[in-house]
Image (cartoon, grey):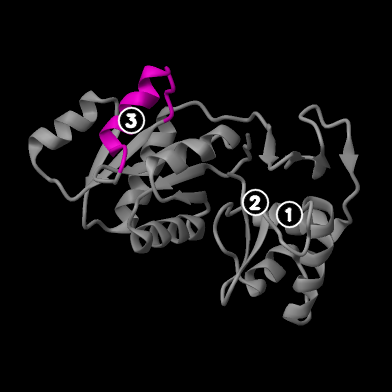
């Protein structure tokens, strides 16, 4: 699980274009955002991350946004949920609210309006301050302390350099999503060529991967950069 001062938002939408647009816009508005293509993927992310609010599409393959919200509330999870849908009828909005959604936004929508609704909802709930460990494959990473461990209590440390710690923290800002070398360099406070990021990725892989030549966690995304898988 992970938490920090910036609100963490999970966006679940099977439309990659909308999902990418929303997550990037949220980042620009000082939210930590992560995306999932369906409810199942969203639930896997929630096993490893604590979020402040969830934005979920209603019409998705597999479990719908209605069903996802209903399941969330059946577990007594009170995380605020905003449902997105192309269905604008009153009965659909009522159904979403009956399932436990906190707000409802019909597509197409202005991202600015979504941000305003998110801020309004977050003002109603107590701010979370707890910091938890992030689960990455067989490892645990303390985002607050910058410590990578082989166990959840953080006692069996894996030594990371300062740059490796920055790189891992930077990749965890957008888990399961590609990040360009340029963005990673900026987040890590590194100057120089893209080759410098490649070198640090190679070093970090040697500590994360069983087989660094065939990485399972820290993946290269052709033409886009790198991605850290946490599910």
Q: CA distance from mark 1 to mark 3?
A: 31 Å
Element under label 2?
Answer: loop
Residue 38 spot, x, y in % from top left: 38, 45
- Left or right of 8: which side holds 21? left
Identify the residue under disc 2: 172
Element under label 3?
Answer: helix
Tell me which residue sits at (39%, 56%) in the image. 19
Tell me which residue sits at (45%, 56%) in the image. 23
Task: Identify the magenta region.
Answer: 62-79
Identify the residue under disc 3: 69
Residue nearest the observer in this picture, 213 or 27: 213
Q: Work out whether 209 lies above or below 179.
A: above
Q: Quadrant of the N terminus?
A: top right
- Left or right of 11: which side holds 128? right
Identify the residue under disc 1: 168
Residue 25 spot, x, y in % from top left: 43, 60
Tell me which residue sits at (16%, 36%) in the image. 93
Q: Work out whether 71 lies above or below 183.
A: above
Disc 1 + disc 2, Cβ < 8 Å = yes
């Amino acid at each position: 699980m992970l938490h920090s001062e910036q609100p963490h938002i999970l966006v679940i939408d099977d439309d990659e274009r909308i999902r990418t647009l929303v997550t990037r816009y949220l980042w620009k508005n000082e939210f930590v955002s992560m995306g999932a293509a369906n409810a199942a993927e969203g639930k896997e992310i929630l096993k490893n991350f604590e979020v402040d609010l969830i934005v979920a599409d209603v019409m998705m393959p597999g479990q719908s946004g209605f069903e996802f919200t209903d399941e969330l509330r059946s577990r007594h999870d009170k995380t605020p949920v905003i449902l997105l849908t192309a269905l604008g009828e009153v009965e659909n909005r009522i159904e979403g609210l009956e399932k436990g959604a906190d707000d409802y936004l019909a597509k197409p929508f202005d991202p600015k309006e979504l941000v305003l609704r998110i801020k309004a909802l977050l003002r109603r709930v107590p701010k979370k301050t707890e910091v938890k460990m992030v689960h990455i494959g067989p490892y645990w990473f303390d985002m607050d302390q910058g410590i990578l461990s082989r166990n959840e209590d953080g006692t069996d440390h894996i030594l990371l350099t300062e740059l490796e710690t920055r790189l891992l923290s930077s990749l965890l800002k957008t888990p399961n999503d590609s990040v360009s070398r340029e963005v990673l360099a900026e987040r890590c406070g590194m100057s120089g060529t893209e080759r410098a990021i490649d070198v640090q990725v190679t070093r970090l892989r040697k500590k994360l991967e069983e087989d660094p030549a065939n990485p399972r966690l820290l993946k290269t995304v052709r033409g886009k950069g790198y991605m850290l898988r946490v599910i």
